[in-house]
Image (cartoon, helix red, strand yellow):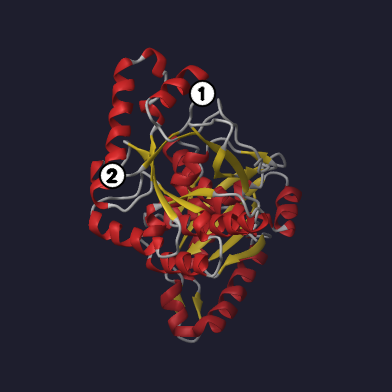
């Protein structure tokens, strides 16, 4: 569980009233641990931070091996705290700490998020070799905080198993009442509310290297759902970062091979997957398919996806990006592009799917164009329950 949700820390923050939250991140933690060992260093640091807390009448709390939080009064001089930290020799070897401090003002009305923001401030200060960094709420800082906080929300949802899975039907164009399979959609929660900016959350998870954690979570959720619903087929998105991770790919294949319903799994490879080495990606897809799953290219026509995908990748489905099919009834060029994409896919024996179809008029044009499957609000909205 995240330290930012520790009840004792939150209560202390509220009880101070108006003050400052200072989070210290130690720069030379690795060098110090090599000298004193982990247990020895922890003993030295705990003693030092307790001494400083007593001196400044502060509340001290350990966040991680390299980070401490001080909750201090508004009048306390943060510069003096930093000076004392870096001038206090620890152990017989007389080694000195090098640290950065993130500082935020708070009041009784402040949200617990202030702790998280301050921690990120200290990390930014550390990265930029700044001694003290105050939360000045500049646009740049807020953007950094937002991206990082999105990643935190994703990670927290996964660790707490609070990611919601929604299911949207994908129907056959031969009979739109026939649900051929469902796409599993991840939805994230914050303070009990479902967040709507899923794409931004996913991009942040990719940027901060935690997307593999989410993709593994979704894989196990898909398996659990398939086990409980023997007639259902499910598709879910997998990031290119996961596919390019050897350990993740091995775990994916081994997990599906241990289960008897891998043939009911469809992996949608996101358009953000790099195609710098299309031959390597082709090999990885072949490895995935040894588990008997099927593979789709998501959002074809956007991002890194291209006609090279059709030439080199062993795929079963092509999901055509909705930008080519929006307002089809009033856009003859889009109708021609759609028809061309369908003909091209058919030449490679690849099934086509059009997503985000919002109305019956566009749906009818898509059906007449020869598309195999269709997905969108006009044919079934996402639901928290699986409706077969």
Q: Position of residue 312 (x, y in %)?
A: 24, 52
Provide the residue designation for mark 1.
358
| Front residue (pair 118, 172) | 172
Vertical relation: 175 (above or below) 234: above
Residue extending farthest top: 330
Q: Position of residue 232 (x, y in %)?
A: 60, 49
Residue 245 falls in which quadrant of the image?
bottom left
Other-residue count near label 1 (Cα within 10 Å), few / some / many at <14 / 14–19 / ≥20: some
Tell me the element at label 1: loop
Which of the image's four quarters has the C terminus?
Answer: top right
Q: Position of residue 340 (x, y in %)?
A: 27, 29
Give me the residue at 55% from left, 54% from top: 218
Left or right relative to 71: residue 129: left
Give me the residue at 61% from left, 46% from top: 165
Provide the residue designation for mark 2.
348
| Front residue (pair 66, 234) | 234
The disc, 2 or 1, on the residue closer to the chain's N-terminal end is: 2
Is any atom of residue 277 visible in this view? Answer: no
Which of the image's four quarters has the N terminus?
Answer: bottom right
Measured in 3D between alpha carbons, the distance from the residue under mark 2 to the one under mark 1, in whole angstroms, is 28 Å
């Amino acid at each position: 569980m995240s330290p930012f949700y520790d009840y004792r820390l939150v209560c202390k923050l509220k009880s101070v009233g108006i003050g400052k939250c200072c989070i210290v991140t130690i720069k030379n933690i690795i060098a110090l641990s090599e000298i004193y060992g982990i247990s020895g260093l922890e003993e030295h640091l705990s003693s030092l931070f307790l001494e400083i807390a007593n001196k400044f009448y502060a509340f001290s709390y350990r966040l991680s091996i390299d980070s401490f939080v001080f909750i201090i009064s508004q009048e306390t001089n943060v510069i003096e705290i930093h000076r004392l930290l870096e001038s206090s020799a620890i152990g017989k070897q007389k080694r000195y700490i090098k640290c950065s401090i993130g500082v935020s003002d708070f009041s009784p009305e402040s949200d617990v998020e202030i702790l998280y923001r301050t921690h990120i401030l200290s990390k930014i200060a550390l990265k930029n070799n700044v001694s003290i960094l105050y939360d000045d709420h500049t646009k740049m800082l807020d953007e950094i905080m937002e991206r990082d906080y999105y990643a935190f929300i994703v990670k927290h949802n996964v660790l707490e198993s609070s990611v919601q899975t929604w299911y949207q039907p994908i129907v056959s164009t031969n009979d739109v009442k026939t649900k051929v399979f469902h796409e599993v959609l991840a939805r994230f929660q914050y303070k009990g509310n479902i967040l709507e900016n899923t794409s931004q959350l996913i991009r942040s998870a990719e940027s901060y290297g935690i997307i593999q954690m989410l993709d593994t979570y979704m894989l196990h959720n898909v398996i659990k759902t398939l086990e409980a619903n023997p007639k259902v087929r499910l598709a879910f998105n997998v990031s290119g970062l996961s596919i390019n991770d050897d350990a993740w790919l091995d775990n994916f294949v081994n997990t599906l091979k241990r289960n008897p319903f891998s043939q009911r799994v469809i992996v949608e490879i996101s358009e953000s997957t790099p195609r710098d080495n299309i031959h390597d990606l082709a090999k990885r897809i072949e490895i995935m398919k040894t588990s008997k799953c099927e593979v789709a290219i998501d959002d074809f026509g956007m991002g890194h996806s291209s006609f090279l995908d059709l030439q080199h990748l062993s795929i079963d489905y092509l999901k055509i990006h909705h930008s080519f099919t929006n307002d089809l009834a009033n856009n003859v060029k889009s109708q021609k592009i759609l028809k061309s994409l369908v003909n091209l896919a058919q030449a490679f024996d690849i099934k086509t799917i059009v997503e985000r179809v919002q109305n019956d008029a566009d749906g009818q044009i898509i059906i007449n164009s020869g598309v195999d499957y269709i997905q969108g609000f006009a044919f079934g909205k996402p639901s928290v329950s699986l409706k077969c």
